[in-house]
Amino acid sequence: MSIGACSGESSSPIPPGSEPDAGPNPNPNPNPHPNPQDAGSSDSGKADAQTPPTVSLPLDVPWIAQKPELPRGCEVTSLAMLLHYAGTPANKMVLADQIVKVPYMKDGLHGNPYDGFVGDMYTFSNPGYGVYHGPVARLAERYFPGRILDLTGAELDGLLTDHVARGRPVWVISNARFQKLAPSDFETWHTASGDVSITWHEHSVVITGFDTASVFINDPLDTSAGKNKKLNRKDFREAWEQMGKQAITYKAER
């Protein structure tokens, strides 16, 4: 049985004979952050000059489970939570159907998660991986035209003080361990649009609150304590930065 990203498992969902070449990652231009670990910074999430808040109680973001219907569907399930809180009760299964998808393998090359969801989201019987921020932000834009903010590259402190503290949760890509991974946990895929770094621990959650030492998240995998799960802020920051500082939220209504 194939396991993979978003599943909470660490084994690779790759059938025998199709293992990727985990060689060096030259970070070519086609992807905005071909290696998630190398993402730059941006001022789009920078806090205001006024004294930023140090605590934001967890927002009451509806918790939605990705399983059993979407074993690899953490990204669209987390997006469903974000959209629900913003006032649009989007269905995770509809989002799963609508997200752009790319083949796991085609002509000897892997699919690129910057281009769409790679492989099969619905079953571990077929190979699959996940999807990064771009396709998710474009899908969210269909529900909130002109209001979606792709803040990938911003700093965590800015996301927390400028958005979460103001009542807007943030969709992010991290890993299922919520701490920095070893370099050996990453591998390089060759894709038609450039090389990309992936990890089978990839996972998507929604940030709902924070304090000076912690962040609170909604974790679609955790059926026992997934709503407003408390995590170490430093560990979470390192895990999120390692995955390319991928983040999406929405603009406040005027």
Image: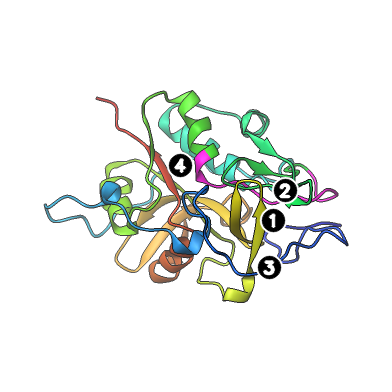
Q: Does the residue at mark 1 contact the one at mark 2 (Cβ under 8 Å)?
A: yes
Image quadrant containing the C terminus: top left
Q: Residues within 10 Å of mark 4 (few under 14, many from 20)?
A: many
Residue 71 shows which numbered tag? 2
Name the residue rendered at 53%, 38% in the picture. Answer: 136
Element at label 3? loop
Q: Is residue 237 visible?
A: yes
Residue reaching furthest to the left: 50
Q: Residues within 10 Å of mark 2 (few under 14, many from 20)?
A: many
Q: Does the residue at mark 2 contact the one at mark 3 (Cβ under 8 Å)?
A: no
User: Of label 4 and label 1, which has the lower sequence position?
Assistant: 1
- Does the segment drawn in magenta span residue 125? yes
**Does residue 147 sit above or below 11 in this rendering?**
above
User: Of discs 4 and 1, which sits in the foreground?
Assistant: 1
Q: Which residue is mark 4?
A: 61
Element at label 4? loop
Q: Does the residue at mark 4 contact the one at mark 3 (Cβ under 8 Å)?
A: no
**Does residue 10 sit above or below 204 in this rendering?**
below
Q: Which residues are magenta?
A: 123-134
Q: Quadrant of residue 157?
A: bottom left
User: Of label 1 and label 2, which has the lower sequence position?
Assistant: 1
Residue 7 shows which numbered tag? 1
Q: What type is the residue that disc 1 sits on?
A: Ser
Distance from disc 4 to disc 1, alpha carbons, whole Å, reads 22 Å
